[in-house]
Image (cartoon, coloured by chain):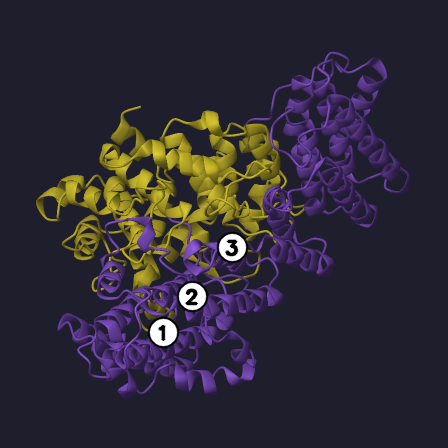
């Protein structure tokens, strides 16, 4: 049951499933062509033929069907078993391969005009360091090559590195039009990461690093096309962590990544992916800045101001409230736990929280029917009580009761939740009309 | 509830027989290009279709012995299964194979005619990253909490959980939790309903629900319901029938299914049916496929829709199968 959307239909309008004779004929021709390629590939693979012919066949098949994971695997095997120089017998089979991405990138990709910025990239021993037994292929390559050693390279070494670099670059080009066409296809992303991994195994660090750095450009391009694509966000995080690793020089990218979330948020306040990323970067960002208490407070104030301004214009936006909740979590979490400002006293936390509650109440003047406002008021007021370990005072209690009532009125779809909340917060006894029982069928 | 359903207009009732016919017709579409383009999902497709048929009350809807033959024809020497004969072994298709064999009570055939349970267990266990606890999908190393869940699902059905480091895997899942209560593909990744299902179900199989922030997660999950009744997968995204499974099963596992409006969700799923030709789509009026058909039906089953067999919220198999295997 696997979470996997390849092959399923998303967002395609339902049409009559009756095809015309001409359409049927056309389908049959396409099927024939596809199956011929497939059976040819299977024949070669069953004969353990990982030659250029096999490589070329995978190119053709993957352009027709990038979800064909076995074809990606065959492609990897052709690279490992001969095309990459470190494993080859010296014959430069690669140059004989007709259809590699070199042609693809100049033709297919030219329209996208991205190609120039997307030349090289690579993740390193991503898979190898996982230490799994299955990665024999990578292991073989690493056994055969010591690309990062300090001995002076021979002309042969240089020649083979050049060739490997060319293959890697070419493979990265090959996947670009496929990714643009199928930006949510797991197999393309994972193949691309594998290729990047090869760069670390096969090329000197500075070259490999450059390839990886340029990969950030690809991630940005893909996120510019769809700012919520979680494949692209995940890929970006992966690339960043490899670039920050010791192998590739180990420089922190936390400042530039944080700045990237700024840009993404400015482009679209509803981009929760960017807010999420921000929440993950902040602790490291402040640590690496060696921020003191004053700087940390200033940072928290700026974040709160920014999100409040956004809420002033978009209080219906869940993304904003989730990020606000993240900031509030930093205030109500136990004293001493690492947070944005770990040194805040309880009194200071209470002050911050009280201020937020007041500001949110002000929102009600302009927005009377936005349920997320009432929800936040409820949660934060309860959080405040929890922080100072007391029960709600009578006026607070009246507020809480009126907010729950409002939530039930504005958001009856989640009635069960409001009833539970009411019961769990001890607000029920004044409302005898509720049984407190969730609706069951 | 039953009364309420009897009053529904015809287009808002489950078109059971159309769906059965649709699923049974899937393997006869060999003159369609898509049939061939989706071969990499064939074994998964059999699982999706067969589970839907079981829930629709037609467990014999696909011929049993041919199904077993097909499943076994996808197995490799190392115990793993590919999506179809000549396709490489992968966690996703291996889990589907185990689920199918579980559903039709055919583990004995795996012993006598296949490579045996132990070999399947070994294949899966070898995909665990022993340093971090998570799992790869295959020998090429892509890691994802989907694969971790797949391993837990299949190995527990096979009674082979002892082959893996469960504690380490559990720690890994815990590290995938976000401040919003949800879980992602790996530590640091954004919460996503599909990954939440895999993580919550994994923790449930490992009997470690204590690690879940149920209040926070339940809040996030319940906010997936949109005014039209459908559920989305992340904040500010469109609704899609498949989340009727990922979100609802997660709510069910943490005991908070009543935090959303069931009637509205039932109506949304029913609106996505092709009542004439069968099948369910992502949204009303879109093309149907077997994947959305299954997850529409499992969603309805979780909500106790009349006439459907009950689905198990952890394994996505009929409750009857789970009871037979675990005896509870």
Q: Marks 2/1: CA distance?
A: 21 Å
Co-location on one chain, circles 2 and 1 = yes
Whether residue A15 is visible to the viewer of this picture, yes or no, is: no
Using residue A345 as the reference point, say whether residue B217 is left or right of it: left
Residue A417 point in image, percent of width and height: 64, 29
Residue B202 point in image, percent of width and height: 39, 36
Q: Chain A in the picture: what colour?
A: purple
Q: Secondary structure at mark 1?
A: helix
**Residue at screen point 24% across, 53% down:** A134
Whether residue B226 is visible to the viewer of this picture, yes or no, is: yes
User: Which residue appears farthest toward the right when viewing the image?
Assistant: A365
Q: Secondary structure at mark 2?
A: loop
Name the residue beneath numbered marker 1: A62
Q: Chain B in the picture: what colour?
A: yellow
Residue A306 point in image, percent of width and height: 78, 47
**Residue at screen point 26% across, 34% down:** B161
In the picture, the quarter occupied by the C terminus of chain B is top left
Name the residue beneath numbered marker 3: A237
Q: Is residue A242 above or below residue B260?
A: below
Co-location on one chain, circles 3 and 2 = yes
Number of numbered discs: 3
Nearer the viewer's eye, disc 2 or disc 1? 2
Name the residue beneath numbered marker 2: A122
Front-most of residues A284 and A127: A284
């Amino acid at each position: 049951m696997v979470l996997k959307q390849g092959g399923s239909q998303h967002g395609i309008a339902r049409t009559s499933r009756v095809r015309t004779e001409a359409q049927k004929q056309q389908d049959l021709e396409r099927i024939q062509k596809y199956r011929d390629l497939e059976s040819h590939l299977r024949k070669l693979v069953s004969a353990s033929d990982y030659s250029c012919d096999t490589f070329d066949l995978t190119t053709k098949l993957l352009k027709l069907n990038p979800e064909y994971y076995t074809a990606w695997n065959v492609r990897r095997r052709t690279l490992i078993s001969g095309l990459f120089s470190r494993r080859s017998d010296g014959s430069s089979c690669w140059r004989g391969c007709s259809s590699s991405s070199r042609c693809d990138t100049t033709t297919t990709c030219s329209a996208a005009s991205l190609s120039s910025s997307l030349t090289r990239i690579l993740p390193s021993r991503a898979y190898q360091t996982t230490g799994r037994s299955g990665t024999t292929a990578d292991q073989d390559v690493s056994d055969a090559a010591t690309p990062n050693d300090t001995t002076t390279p021979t002309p042969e070494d240089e020649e083979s590195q050049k060739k490997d670099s060319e293959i890697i670059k070419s493979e990265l080009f090959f996947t670009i039009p496929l990714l643009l066409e199928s930006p949510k296809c797991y197999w393309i992303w994972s193949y691309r990461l594998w290729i990047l991994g090869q760069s670390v195994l096969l090329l000197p660090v500075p070259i490999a690093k450059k390839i990886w750095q340029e990969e950030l450009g690809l991630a940005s391009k893909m996120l510019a096309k769809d700012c919520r694509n979680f494949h692209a966000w995940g890929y970006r995080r992966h690339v960043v962590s490899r670039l920050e690793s010791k192998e590739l020089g180990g420089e922190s990218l936390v400042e530039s990544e944080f700045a990237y979330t700024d840009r993404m948020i400015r482009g679209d306040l509803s981009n929760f992916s960017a807010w999420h990323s921000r929440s993950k970067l902040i602790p490291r960002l402040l640590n690496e800045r060696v921020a003191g208490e004053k700087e940390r407070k200033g940072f928290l104030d700026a974040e709160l101001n920014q999100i409040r301004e956004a809420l002033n214009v978009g209080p219906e936006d869940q993304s904003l409230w989730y990020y606000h909740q993240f900031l509030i979590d930093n205030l109500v979490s136990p004293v001493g736990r690492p947070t944005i400002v770990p040194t805040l006293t309880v009194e200071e936390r209470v002050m911050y929280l009280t201020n937020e509650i007041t500001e949110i109440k002000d929102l009600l003047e302009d927005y009377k029917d936005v349920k997320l406002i009432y929800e936040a008021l409820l949660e934060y007021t309860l959080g405040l009580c929890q922080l100072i370990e007391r029960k709600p005072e009578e006026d607070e209690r009246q507020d809480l009761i009126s907010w729950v009532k409002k939530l039930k009125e504005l958001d009856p779809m989640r009635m069960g939740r409001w009833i539970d909340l009411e019961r769990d917060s001890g607000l029920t006894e004044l409302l005898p009309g509720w049984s407190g029982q969730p609706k069951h069928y | 509830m039953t009364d309420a359903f009897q009053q529904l207009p015809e287009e808002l009732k489950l078109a059971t027989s159309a769906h059965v016919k649709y699923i049974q017709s899937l393997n006869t579409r060999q003159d369609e290009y898509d049939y061939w383009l989706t071969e990499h999902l064939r074994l998964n497709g059999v699982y999706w279709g067969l589970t839907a048929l079981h829930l629709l009350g037609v467990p014999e809807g696909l011929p049993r012995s041919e199904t077993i033959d097909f499943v076994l024809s996808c197995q490799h020497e190392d115990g793993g299964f590919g999506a179809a004969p000549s396709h490489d072994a992968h966690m996703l298709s291996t889990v589907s194979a185990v689920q199918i064999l579980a559903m039709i009570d055919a583990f004995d055939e795996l012993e006598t005619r296949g490579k045996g349970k132990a070999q399947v267990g070994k294949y899966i266990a070898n995909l665990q990253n022993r340093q971090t606890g998570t799992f790869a999908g295959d020998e090429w190393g892509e890691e994802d909490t989907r694969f971790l869940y797949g391993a837990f699902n299949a190995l527990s059905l096979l009674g082979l959980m002892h082959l893996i480091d469960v504690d380490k895997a559990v720690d890994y899942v815990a590290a995938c939790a976000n401040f919003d209560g949800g879980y992602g593909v790996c530590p640091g990744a954004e919460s996503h309903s599909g990954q939440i299902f895999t993580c919550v179900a994994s923790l449930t199989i490992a009997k470690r629900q204590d690690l879940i922030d149920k209040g926070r997660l339940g809040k996030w999950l319940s906010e997936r319901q949109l005014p039209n009744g459908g559920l989305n997968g992340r904040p500010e995204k469109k609704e899609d029938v498949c989340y009727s499974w990922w979100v609802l099963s997660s709510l069910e596992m943490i005991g908070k299914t009543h935090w959303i409006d069931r009637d509205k969700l039932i109506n949304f799923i029913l609106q996505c049916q092709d009542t004439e030709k069968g099948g369910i789509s992502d949204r009303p009026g879109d093309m149907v496929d077997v994947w959305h058909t299954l997850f529409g039906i499992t969603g309805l089953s979780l909500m106790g829709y009349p006439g459907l067999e009950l689905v198990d919220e952890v394994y996505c198999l009929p409750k009857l199968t789970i009871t037979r295997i675990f005896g509870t």
